[in-house]
Amino acid sequence: MTFRKMVPCFIRSYQDAIHELNKSIKLSNYLTPSNPRLLKEQRYGLSAVYCSAVGIEDQQLRDLHVIHVTGSKGKGSVCSMIENVLQKSGFRTGFLSSPHLINVEERIRINGRPISRDHFASLFWDVHGTLLEFTKTSINIPMPSFLHYIFVMACKAFVDEKVDVGIFEVGIGGRYDHTNIFKDPYVTVVTSLALEHTNILGNTIAEIAWAKAGIFKTGSIALVSHGQSDEAMHKFVEEAELVKCPLYVAPTLDSLLTTENMTEPFKDIFDNMNTIPNSQLLNLALSLTTINYWFAKLHGTTNNDNVTNIGLQPTSEWKPSSTVLFNALSARWPGRWQIVIRKNITYYLDGAHTVESLQV
């Protein structure tokens, strides 16, 4: 049921919005996976209810041509590369990231830039006012948690701004994440895996892979990074066959490079690729492959309805142009493999949260 009554909203400041938003932070939202029904209801189930309540329809979500990205490492980097390439290709982009580095409005980006504080405040008070009235007249529907607020605000911003593509980074896991409401995203993506959030996702790579594969959807394209473990791949193939979608493994970056796409006018940046860590090269290959399949889906050149195109599929022979490769390489994502030089000191800044990321 849509509850889109315009609620009177006095002009409230950005700081007031942050104060009210921070009151919604509840650690209890990160439930253990012991009760799937409760997880579904309290995480993405509520996201769908809230989106409907603020007037966002299923077709409007479909029109976002969603790229949904999960994984343990490199999600933000992959998303930022995709964002930069598609924006430079003339598409209007929306990108929801998690977490923010300094200010919360960084999480919601339109055309490569965080929304303004005024825009953030306006979105928050609109969503807050509508849901305040909605929950008063609804049975067993609480006010949103912090992550629900941000997700609904991002969806509203992307719909209002009529973006051509919505890039959504999963918060934790995937299967029960608050972002997992999309019925038919264009491409679902899994980056490299590692043991992380084990109290929530499980203690093995297989369990974590099962949680991540929960974003695969019928008829959508599922794509995973190169070099996944056998136990992870087993879960990915199993889930793709279960939901009836094609599954692709991104190739190595070397297989995407040619003498044609490593030429001028971008030769200088290509010559410096040997300074990029292997993990980022994996992310680069994954982002480029995602873009290829997103374009194929957009132009209707996929064949997902064929029963033979379910489960693990051979990788495309596509090669990126030098412009696409350059735009992916020139994406900037602060706090993720960021090098800052001040006087005689070089700082390496990265929001690593796994042992593997620290070892890079």
Image (spheres, rainbow, N blue to C red):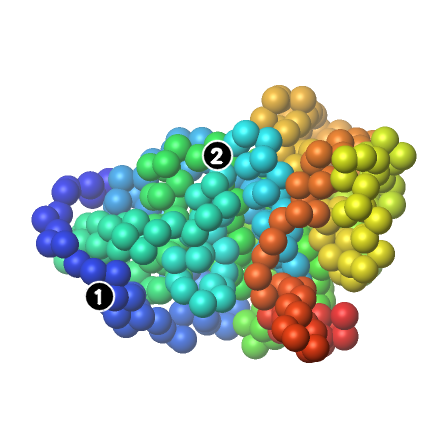
Q: Position of residue 40 (x, y in %)?
A: 44, 58
In the image, 208 versus 109, the foreground residue is 109
Q: Position of residue 108 (x, y in %)?
A: 42, 52
- Image vertical order of residue 213 relative to residue 334, above or below: above
Q: What residue is shown at x 26% (from left), y 61% (from top)? A: 14
For residue 70, what is the image quadrant? bottom right
Task: Tell me which amino acid carries mark 2.
Answer: Arg
The quarter of the image holding the C terminus is bottom right
- Image vertical order of residue 170 relative to residue 327, above or below: below
Disc 2, disc 1: CB below 8 Å?
no
In the shown orientation, is residue 324 left or right of residue 253? Answer: left
Q: Which residue is mark 2?
A: 92
Task: Tell me which amino acid carries mark 1.
Answer: Asp
Could you say which disc has been placed on residue 280 in the image? none
In the shown orientation, is residue 340 left or right of residue 57? Answer: right
In the image, 184 versus 10, the foreground residue is 10
Q: What residue is shown at x 75% (from left), y 31% (from top)? A: 321
Q: Position of residue 272 (x, y in %)?
A: 81, 53
Could you say which disc has been placed on residue 16 in the image? 1
In the image, 260 versus 39, the foreground residue is 260
In the shown orientation, is residue 317 left or right of residue 202? Answer: right
The number of numbered badges drawn on the structure is 2
Which label's residue is closer to the chain start, 2 or 1?
Answer: 1
Q: What residue is shown at x 29% (from left), y 66% (from top)? A: 18
Identify the secondary structure beneath mark 1.
Answer: helix
